[in-house]
């Protein structure tokens, strides 16, 4: 909120992670240190999980040059979450069905941003919102009695919003309008078509990120699956501009 | 509310695209939405005119076919606080054409957003735009009454960030 939250933008993971931090009782130096620690974690996640860097641990895992046992421990943690997301999404999120080997990218950014927010929480800041290139999570309150509010970007207009939602914890959106047809339909094995924008809200950003990927690929079929998961909701903008949601998303507008 | 279908609706937030636009000082507090001629009336490559063209409008966006009155804007009054200024963002390709948006900031908040320039590529996109623009206008003032903290959207690149509403928010609150 204007005048209350300190902001920081970190270029990492091929995107920009924006922080809005309400320090509360925390000193400015401690707050800054917490944001720096959070950013260091993001850079480490980038180093470990990058599929662009051919030398990264996950790239070596993808090529079969290394086993899971030799990976940093967070790789197994992320793959466990991927397995959970695959089951929960009825297979619409499936890192094991990607061309070129296992690809946890659809969950990693959400996971890393969620950890960054946890760093701030543990450091004692009163409230924060961390937005990793469009996937965000928040805790606390930006001001007395105020919820965090997030706009969902309009799929055809970088400068417009489709709606505004109250951020209870995590909000993730997946679509191809920013980076092209990178979403693979795990059942068809080819780029997915037909969904303009897919948003998932829920307690965990790692899970919401993965489920948003599933929703972008699976459309209405995946929406039904996501609506059935406790705590998670989906909001879909179809290719024709029509919208659907699984209920219980707190739309402000 | 399970399975509730929501009518298409476009809310606008101010994109101050890269802050490369022209800064124009306004004497008043808040600039109402540009009414005047519809940008589409000028056809492809049409322009809504100079950055200062702004006329008060009431009930803009009527006939947008929206079925959810809760998502209509409730206020069309001037923005709180003084010292309003306007920024016309750079022209951005939105997939079906190009658009440049004028954002007016007053008291540290987005007071209004209007379309400064719009050109579309094909008849279908003109259709999309002609549906979108009136709704955009009607919802713009909602961004005034509801100050958002962040924007959720498909992952942008570092370059894409510069054009994002999130970048505008970060700059606004920095």
Image: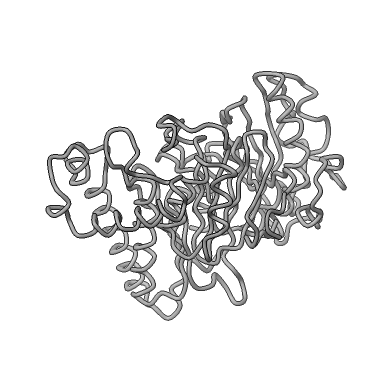
Q: Residue at x 74, y 26 (%)?
A: B127
Q: Residue at x 58, y 37 (%)?
A: A196
Q: Position of residue B163 (x, y in %)?
A: 51, 39
Instruction: Point out the image quarter for the C terminus of chain A.
Output: bottom right
The reply, left or right, for residue B97 in relation to residue A37 is right
The reply, left or right, for residue A238 in relation to residue B163 is right
The reply, left or right, for residue A119 in relation to residue B120 is left
Instruction: Point out the image quarter for the N terminus of chain A.
Output: bottom right
Question: Could you tell me if residue A2 is visible in this image?
Answer: no
* Residue nearest the observer in this picture, A101 or B174: A101
Q: Position of residue A112 (x, y in %)?
A: 34, 56
**Image height check: is A227 above or below B115?**
below
Total labels drawn: 0
* Residue nearest the observer in this picture, A231 or B121: A231
Question: Could you tell me if residue A173 is visible in this image?
Answer: yes
Q: Residue at x 59, y 37 (%)?
A: B89
The colour scheme is one colour
Q: Position of residue A229 (x, y in %)?
A: 52, 61
Q: Residue at x 37, y 69 (%)?
A: A120
* Residue nearest the observer in this picture, A113 or A76: A76
Q: Position of residue A215 (x, y in %)?
A: 52, 46
């Amino acid at each position: 909120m204007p005048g209350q939250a300190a902001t920081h933008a970190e270029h990492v993971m091929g995107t920009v992670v924006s922080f809005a931090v309400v320090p509360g009782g925390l000193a400015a130096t401690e707050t800054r240190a917490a944001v720096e620690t959070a950013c260091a974690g993001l850079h480490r996640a980038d180093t470990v999980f990058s599929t662009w860097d051919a030398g990264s641990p996950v790239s070596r895992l993808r090529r079969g040059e290394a086993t899971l046992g030799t990976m940093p421990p967070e790789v197994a943690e992320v793959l466990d979450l991927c397995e959970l997301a695959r089951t929960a999404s009825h297979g619409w999120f499936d890192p094991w069905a990607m061309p070129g080997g296992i690809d946890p990218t659809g969950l990693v950014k959400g996971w890393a941003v969620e950890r960054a927010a946890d760093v701030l929480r543990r450091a004692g800041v009163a409230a924060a919102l961390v937005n990793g290139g469009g996937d965000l999570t928040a805790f606390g309150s930006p001001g007395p009695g105020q919820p965090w509010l997030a706009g969902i970007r309009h799929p055809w207009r970088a400068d417009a919003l489709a709606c505004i939602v109250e951020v209870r914890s995590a909000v993730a959106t997946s679509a191809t309008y920013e980076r092209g047809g990178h979403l693979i339909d795990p059942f068809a094995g080819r780029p997915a078509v037909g969904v303009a924008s897919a948003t998932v809200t829920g307690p965990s950003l790692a899970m919401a990120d993965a489920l948003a990927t599933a929703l972008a690929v699976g459309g209405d079929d995946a929406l039904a699956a996501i609506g059935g998961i406790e705590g998670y909701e989906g909001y879909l903008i179809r290719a024709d501009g029509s919208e659907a949601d699984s209920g219980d998303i707190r739309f402000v507008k | 509310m399970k399975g509730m279908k929501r009518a298409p609706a476009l809310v606008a937030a101010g994109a101050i695209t890269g802050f490369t636009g022209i800064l124009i000082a306004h004497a008043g507090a808040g600039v109402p939405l540009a009414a005047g001629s519809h940008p589409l009336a000028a056809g492809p490559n049409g322009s809504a005119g100079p950055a200062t063209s702004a006329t008060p409008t009431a009930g803009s966006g009527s006939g947008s076919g929206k079925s959810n009155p809760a998502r209509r804007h409730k206020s069309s009054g001037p923005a709180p606080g003084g010292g309003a200024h306007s920024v016309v963002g750079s022209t951005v390709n939105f997939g079906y054409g190009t658009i440049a948006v004028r954002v007016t900031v007053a008291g540290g908040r987005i007071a209004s957003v209007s379309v400064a320039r719009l050109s579309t590529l094909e008849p279908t996109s003109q259709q999309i735009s002609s549906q979108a623009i009136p709704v955009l206008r009607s919802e713009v003032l909602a961004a005034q009454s509801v100050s958002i903290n962040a924007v959720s959207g498909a992952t942008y690149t570092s370059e894409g960030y510069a054009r994002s509403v999130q970048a505008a928010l970060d700059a606004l609150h920095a």
